[in-house]
Amino acid sequence: MTTISISEIQQDFAGYLSRVQAGEVLVITSDGQPVAEIKPASLGYGEQRRIELVDFLKGRIDDARVPSRWRDEGVADPTDECRRSCLELTEQLFEKHGLLPVKVVASRQEGIYLEYKSPRSGRILGIEVDNELDIVAVVSDANQTLASGAFEAEKAEGLLCIFFDTVATSPGDSWASGA
Amino acid sequence: MYRGYSLSDLDDNGNIDVASFESRDLSCNWDRFSVPSDIRHRPSGRQTDGCHSLSVDIARYKNLATPCHDPIRESEYENYAHVEIRWLNAGEAIEFMPPHGRNIGRSKTAKAQRLEWRTNAVRQVRFELQATD
């Protein structure tokens, strides 16, 4: 805790503010008497919730391990890079679309399989992130598969539109059922 | 076709998990020449394994794969009913029999197609024999 006068802080407000950002607490005095404190802002609710969410997703992704039977057959666990890619993807899907996976499991394809369910359309979005860091996805409903393709850029947006049932066309140049 | 599975291949709802399907040739038995419990006697089989079945139509979904009769010749396994579901490359006829163990496409499109194939398959398989602990 540092005590400074009003005139001192007025001379270099930005400098003192950067010290606060670094964690220091300043007590402002007027005529030698403390009148105010400046301290680092606490995390807002939104930021705190985001951190908790990332921890939750990271925990689920870290828990995705191949069963011992698959390991005996030579199937490798998801790599650290695959897990990072998966975490980045799940964060993006939450931040952009409010989506949380209903399933996060290791895949026999050597990677991680994620599954999302649309509360509105009831459709399923299955996404696989493999150890080569390729990301592919398929959208299906209760009766059939609807579309699939690489889950990247415009193609991903197209697949998400089909998942949310906001458009009736197939995504980009990926191939849809019936093609 | 009969395909063996274990409890680790099931999701929380007791369905075959999309993530549990092999990326290579899928080993099965012909139902015409075997019974579901025969899969427990395959080379990698266990007495706790279950069995589910896929039709030829499911295997040939969108001409992405096709069943190939592939007898196991090791004398210790008299499993003459063995069949493999093998991936086809784009343009290959559905009657074509891809060689055992050939490399499969690594493009994102090929991977997406295989994920779609698996997604379609798991919704249509029929349980023949339950796996146990």
Image (cartoon, rainbow, N blue to C red):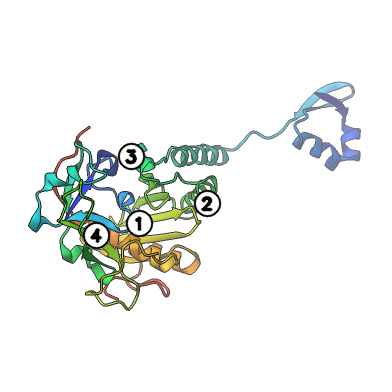
Q: Nearer the viewer, residue A38 or B123?
A: B123
Q: Label 1 neighbourhood size at 10 Å, few (<14), some (14-19), many (20+)?
A: some
Q: Earlier in the sequence, mark 2 or mark 3?
A: 3
Amino acid type shown at disc 4: Glu
Q: Nearer the viewer, mark 1 or mark 2?
A: 1
- Snapshot quadrant of residue A4: top right
On residue A39, which mark appears? none
Q: Nearer the viewer, mark 4 or mark 2?
A: 4
Could you give the CA–CA distance between mark 2 and mark 3, rounded to whole angstroms? 26 Å
In the rendered image, which residue does mark 4 sit on? B84
Q: Nearer the viewer, mark 4 or mark 3?
A: 4
Where is residue B93 shown, x and y percent of the image?
A: 26, 77
Q: Earlier in the sequence, mark 4 or mark 1?
A: 1
Q: Give the vertical position of A73 relative to B106 (above or below).
A: above
Whether label 4 touches label 1, CB < 8 Å: no
Q: Label 4 neighbourhood size at 10 Å, few (<14), some (14-19), many (20+)?
A: many
Whether label 2 touches label 3, CB < 8 Å: no
Amino acid type shown at disc 2: Ser
In the rendered image, which residue does mark 1 sit on? B23
Q: Give the vertical position of A135 relative to B7 (above or below).
A: below
Could you give the CA–CA distance between mark 4 and mark 2, rounded to whole angstroms? 33 Å
Amino acid type shown at disc 1: Ser
Asked if badges 4 and 3 are on one and the same chain, I answer: no
Q: Secondary structure at mark 4?
A: strand
In the rendered image, which residue does mark 3 sit on? A69
